[in-house]
Amino acid sequence: MNQSYKPTKEDFQPAAKSVRAEQISRPSLSYWQDAWRRLKKNTRALISLYIIIGLALFTLAGPFLWNVDPALQDLNQISQAPSWPKQAILVDPYQRWGGIVLDNFPAEPDDYLDIIPAPTNLRVVDVATTKRVRITWDPVVGAGGYSVYRNQRAPETINDLGLPLGVTDGGNEVSFEDRLNLEQREYFYSIVPTDGFDESDTYITLVVLPDLAITMSEARERNLLAQDTKLGDSIAIEFHPFGTDYLGRDMLARLMEGAQVSLFIGIFAPLLFVLFGIIYGGFAGYFGGQFDSLLMRFADFVVALPFLLFMILFKIAFGIGPGESGVMPMLLALVLLGWPSTARLVRGQVLQIRENAFIEAARLLGAKDHYLIIRHIIPNTMGVILVTLTFAVPSAIFTEAFLSFIGMGVAPPTPSWGSMCNEGVKTMLSHPHELFFPALFISITVLAFNLLGDGLTEALDSRMRSKE
Amino acid sequence: MLAYTLKRLLAGIVTVWFIATATFTAMHMVPGDPLMNDKAVSAEIRANLERKYGLDKSAPAQYVIFMKNMLSGDFGISFTQQNRQVNDIIRDHFPVSATLGIMAIFFATIGGVLWGALTALYRNRLPDIIIMFLVILGISVPSFVFAALGQLLLVNINSLFGASIIPVAGWGTLSHMLMPSMVLGLGTMALLTRLMRSSMLEIVNEDYIRTARAKGLSPSRIFFRHQLRNAILPVITVLGPQIAAITTGGFVVELVFAIPGLGRYFVQAVQQLDYTVIMGTTVFYGAFLVLMVILVDILYGFIDPRVRLS
Amino acid sequence: MKYLLFLMTLWSAITSAQAPVTSADFEEQTISIALTQEPPQLNSMKATDQVSNFILPHIMEGLVRYDRRGRIVPGVAYKWEIDPDGMGATFWLRENALWSDSKPVTANDFVFAWRTTLAPETASEYAFILFPIKNAEAANKGKAKLTDIGVTAIDDYTIRVELERPTAYFIKLTAFATYFPVREDFFNSRGDSYAADAQDLLFNGPFRLTEWVHSASLKMEKNETYWDKEKITLNEINAAYITEDSRARLNLFIDGKIVHTRLDGETYKDALTQKQRIRSFSTGSIFFLEYNHRAGRITDNLNLRRAIQHTFDSDKFVNNVLATPGNLAAESLFPVWLQGVDDKFRKEYPAEVAVVNKGLAAEYLAKAKSELGIEEFPALILLSGNTPTATKQAEYLQGLLKSRLGLDIKIDKQTFKQRLAKMTSGDFDFVLAGWGPDFDDIMTFGDLFASWNLNNRGRYSNPDYDEQVRIALNNVDPKTRMEAMAKLQKIIHDDAVILPMYEQGVIYLMNSKVRGVVRRVVGPDPDYTYSRVIK
């Protein structure tokens, strides 16, 4: 105040009453209403919502849009990587081949040479198809037989010839038929002459790319034939956008069918046992004393029981017949054995929170115990609860996969994402798509719940509100 | 404090007794028995075997015998390895699993606390997103994948250097323990990261943090003195049972890395229905778990003075 | 871009380089291997599993042994004679066969071992392999004294054996681990802990067990007291790793830590990058689908079994489902390696093969339905183990029988003991089963489905079958025996007793520096006794 201020009488007149000053300008919101409002605006929660809707559509609507039988085995397309639709040639059914055994050449060598020269003129007989590849070569003096090898790239040394397919019976048997799991890729066949006992150090290699082939009867069985197709024509065979598994079953269809079980177990089992754990841990932590001790010792007891043994017992106790899908008993088993960790976490948090001043204050105001627990304490443990929930989802999915290992859970051929992962691990390096896709879907599910959890935390947790 | 510990130990003994009884009952209710094998044996030999191992008595009678033996510390002889005492099996192999477990927990805790704190401090920025992505990957991919990949990584590292600098499997030296314990600790590390993050986020806005900052304390001092100590309680809560879980659940890692631990024995024992080994290891693990939980509960009181141990 | 190229070259360098091999040492003549599991039992009188039967013949020796070509050659016995009527045999032992404590191996050691194996209290699961000896079975059942068993030590170096019935293949049996000698005083001094650790065993074989860290490793060193030690080049076999995981073993091989690993359907593709020779070998085991023949079971119906017989294509199964080299399509219960009269049994008596024919199968199925008086078949239960191979095979069968015959198959996956329990109690319709040979004679498969055989878990019972088995058991003349077995083969086909699926083959990696390793169908496999490390 650097200018002189002379108060006047008017300055002390009461001001006009303004109603507006006392109006509440924003609608009054309860805790949950506020939380809901904030959740709706939260980006993370929104993303997770979209993902969850996507997964739901995939599971429920997927099978109708992609109407392929997940149990249909196609031995022509085992472990195929995802690819564009393929064409196959129609061929005759497989006929046994007598092979080529020469009359004018000795079966056993007359002389045992130190080094037997490599055979020459290694060539394919007929057309090489994925049904069979027939090769023949010119015999070489001193040979008492020939070893046949197959590799998937050009061999560099004599030790690098690849898979030993077999040995021919005598120096005059100069042919071999390969039917071992042929795919439409380059194969390098190598022939090593032997003297009947030991192999020589020489070899000859041939590269062969078999055509993808299918027999008329197989094509007819699977309704792939059009009216006028005949032998030698090229027809389109089933398209597998995500590839196939180790028995030639469509990955996409299996993922859709597996989603049903995995999502059901992966969502409901955690929800149930976390809910149970919250109530159990909340009450134990709040009341403390003997009650707490008793409850916690029981929780310890449950954790220490040997899981596998009790699962086997559950399976028998629930009378799951052979080959039946025991999903409900498995759900029950997962819940019964999964709640202790949540309970303990929640109890720990409750022990901390109940010492806070606002609890004491609420109690002084006359709040009953269960009101305090449900209304005040538990919302403050939301952070921990949501973390447990996020971790419980993949844990339930993998436990379900483990249980199908002992025959509980889904029965073959019904897939689940977890068991698909189990199977995919074995071919992880050679056919990564068998592991990649189920793991991807599990990751997406976990991501969705993680984001939802984060969103919920930001919306619900009172302490985080001040960040805005 | 002493009275509390004694009370807990007593309760622990009762718990272990319950565990033993429940397991014994379950074991005998499951079809099959330790004596069945691929090659069938004649009725006479079978009778002899049953007599030799005391399986010819009724289940309650066997239970009484088992309890009596257990009290004198004798868990009997393994059915599958007929010259080894169960006590010897536990004594030889538990330290291996324990060492593996402790190292795994060590990695998991350091990693979990560190990453969790980082994500909380850099919330919604790049480090947070990357770490959370890795966490999700860490829990969505099954552990045997990581074990196989980890071993493969070692093979490739060795061939890159042209010498076998890190052993890809086996047990004996510190370098044998590195990869297996990291793989074993991954799941727990992911869990601890998440827990740490959520509890740090809650604390970061507390008044006392603001006060500390207003007082002019350096960020690292605030972090270590105030934030860490308060945020770590959920981590401690989980740590006790996690130690027990990791030490007993290292089956996959022990298999892939050829580690002579107790986890492998235990799983095989359940599959072979090796009664004595199942009982011995379950009781032992149960006691171990109970002990861990007691330790953790006592630790609570030291870390958070507000928590009264009734 | 340059960075990318660099990464790519680095990556290809990584994936194609190999670590130097430390698993085979030429100077020291040592090799390192991995075991698939901890040997449960190194007591030769009680051992039943594969790992123990791999280790035992390396560290101990019986009356005879196998040479590099799989023929029976002298072991502790340098000479033997079988009586013309086949009812007895005499063995003369060499005097320079010593135990690892330098005391000689005597006839009493064999007598003691065989008597103890048969003693009821020992409860040995392989006692049955001694049953050709007179009174052996009776003694095992407690109906005769141990001293009544037909084996006596005429003197310290001569053994006389009386047989229960003319057993042509008795000599071959004595190569088996259960027939190995055990010294009485040593056994008694160790009591319950006999064979519990390396110091609780005596060795008379080419190697001795010097170190045994349970579940971790095992070391065998050349036995300086072995009578034929001049022939043994290798100084040490170090089983440094024990793990069931085949991928872990492959990684150990790639890392240069072990000289041998078996490959399976998934790991062989990774092994192709290793530039080591992949070899294949037939294990001599046969795998089949075993039907439940108990009365009241649907699978007791012959026409149903015939329908399945004409649907299953073993060739396709071997080539596309098993998909590893070495497996053979199965045509009979008897695998191809079994010896007949002068040549292989299957060459002299080829098996009949059921042709895959949809029409024929459908006919049989219809006949079965009308015989059973049903419109549709109820769900059939396929009992299977829970290993990945078993699951794959079971799922394949399920898909095949559903698509070709319209049969609804439920797969009953069980863990090991539960599956055994169900097999014994007959709680299945069919089960995936297999059988491996114990000794080198057709009888190791021949009596499998005799009605008295406890391993005949499907309880197949056919007096004709039993008759043929008895003929083969009680005759010494090879022609008579083989004729009987050929008839048996026909019965198995006509009566569709089982559905033979495949003869097992394995592929494996063996370090090319190690030579002279023998793969065996019977006997220790792989056999490192005569192997050596080259430069």
Image (cartoon, coloured by chain):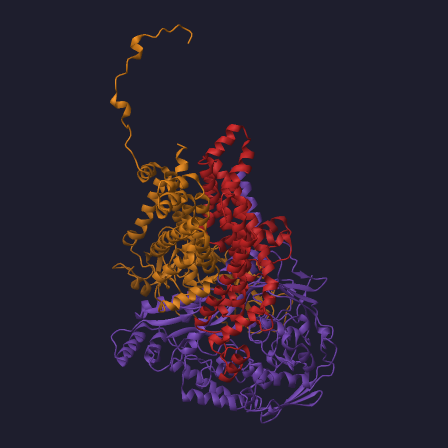
Chain colours: A orange, B red, C purple
Question: Is A338 placed left or right of C124 in the picture?
Answer: left
Question: Is C293 placed left or right of C159 in the picture?
Answer: left
Instruction: Residue B274: tell me if it is visible.
Output: no
Q: Which of A182 and C126 is in front in this view?
A: C126
Q: Nearer the viewer, residue B129 or A200?
A: B129
- Looking at the image, residue B17 lies above or below residue B56: above
Count of number-bearing discs: 0
Residue at 57 percent across and 45 percent down: it is: C10
Q: Which of C302 and C424 is in front in this view?
A: C424
Q: Where is residue A66 in the image (x, y as percent from the top left)?
A: 30, 53
Question: Is B8 placed left or right of C113 in the picture?
Answer: left
**Quadrant containing the C terminus of chain A in the rendered view:** top left
**Quadrant containing the N terminus of chain A in the rendered view:** top left
Quarter holding residue C223: bottom right
Quarter holding residue A355: top left
Quarter holding residue C244: bottom right
Q: Nearer the viewer, residue A468 or C416?
A: A468
Q: Where is residue B27 in the image (x, y as percent from the top left)?
A: 46, 69
Q: Where is residue A206 in the image (x, y as percent from the top left)?
A: 51, 58
- Looking at the image, residue B82 lies above or below residue A89: below
Residue at 31 percent across and 49 percent down: it is: A56
Q: Position of residue A33 (x, y in %)?
A: 30, 38
Instruction: Residue A288: tell me if it is visible.
Output: yes
